[in-house]
Image (spheres, rainbow, N blue to C red):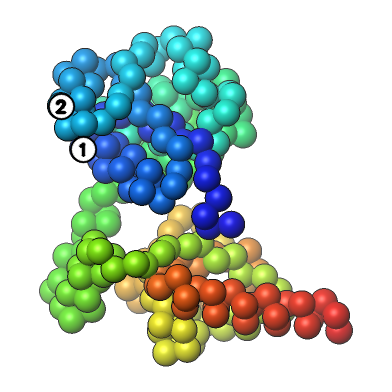
Amino acid sequence: MRNTSRNITVVGATPVGLEVARQLTQRGQRVTIVDDYKADVDKAHAQGFSVEQINLQDDDELRRVGIGGDTDVLFALRNDDASNVFLVISAKAIAPDLPVVSISGSRDTIERLYAAGATKVIDPYRISGYKIYELMHRSVIAETMERTVFGKVDLDIAEVHVEPGSFLHGKYLDELSLDERYDLIVLGVVDRNYGDHLIFATDPRRHRMDAGDVLVIIGPEEAFARFHNDLNAELSGEEAG
């Protein structure tokens, strides 16, 4: 499932938008990049990216690039918060069920983006804050992550949904020991008791894994294969019983 190719539209020929597009393309996704700001489009072209300039306030233009059609996921990654909010509203009006990921520069905008219909909102300042925490308090782990996650080692990242009957269900996050059992690192968790947002593993609260919670895990492909085999085998045994 993690290797399924999807049609993804990235709106924003910004540094963040181009980096997201680059990484998605490397993972085998079909990516279309669009923007209406000519200066950013020209810069992206100079860097070798294929970007189409469209009028983002024209619903017909949005439909033409796949919104409401073959686009599976939309990334709203412009530098201007107001533009991202307007884009999310327009996209959800055209395609109410379309997953939309956006970026925000302030707490107020995060709330507006969710109110507009965004599925997930990235808060780069919070992420940077956790990164600084790692560098200051867990330098060995941070250095390892720098070499692997941001290096050339063949790692993968996945969301794992907790299901009743699995060995994840009912366990606390700090009891899973996935690093020892599978050589996998838990980056964070969506604990439904606290809402639908990703909580980084550095959070001091103890999180009990209940059905519907989501683990975000990173590790080698072969480790994921062993992990999923064990999960599937246990769930199959539970169903057979």
Residue 141 lies, with reference to residue 146, above or below; the image says below
On screen, residue 2 versus residue 102, left or right, reads right
> In which quarter of the view is residue 102 placed?
top left
Q: Residue drawn at (18%, 81%), measured in percent from left and top?
A: 140
Of the 4 image quadrants, the one containing the C terminus is bottom right
Q: Sequence-wise, which precedes: disc 2 or disc 1?
A: 1
**Residue designated by label 1:** 15
C-alpha separation, residue under disc 2 versus residue under disc 1: 13 Å
Res 84 quadrant in image: top left
Q: Helix, strand, or loop for circle 2?
A: helix
Q: Amino acid at mark 1?
A: Pro
Note whether 92 is above or below 25 in the view shown. above
Image quadrant containing the N terminus: bottom right
- Residue 75: x and y, percent? 41, 36
214 in relation to 26, above or below:
below
Query: Tags 2 and 1 in contact by the CB under 8 Å rule?
Result: no
Asked if residue 142 can be seen in this view, the reply is: no
What amino acid does circle 2 point to?
Ala
Please give the name of the residue rendered at 57% of the width and 83% of the height, measured from the top-left corner.
171
User: Based on the displayed image, in which of its 4 quarters is residue 142 positioned?
Assistant: bottom left
Left or right: 186 with respect to 190? left
Which residue is drawn at the image coordinates 38% and 43% (left, top)? 25
Q: Position of residue 55 (x, y in %)?
A: 36, 11
Which residue is found at the position 23% from the left and 51% from the top? 125
Residue 133, numbered label: none
Disc 1: CA contacts within 10 A as few (<14), some (14-19) or many (>=20): some
Q: Indicate the secondary structure of the residue bearing disc 1.
A: helix
Total marks in image? 2
Residue placed under numbered mark 2 in the picture: 46
**Relative to 226, 19 lies left or right:** left
Residue closest to the eye, 5 or 135: 5
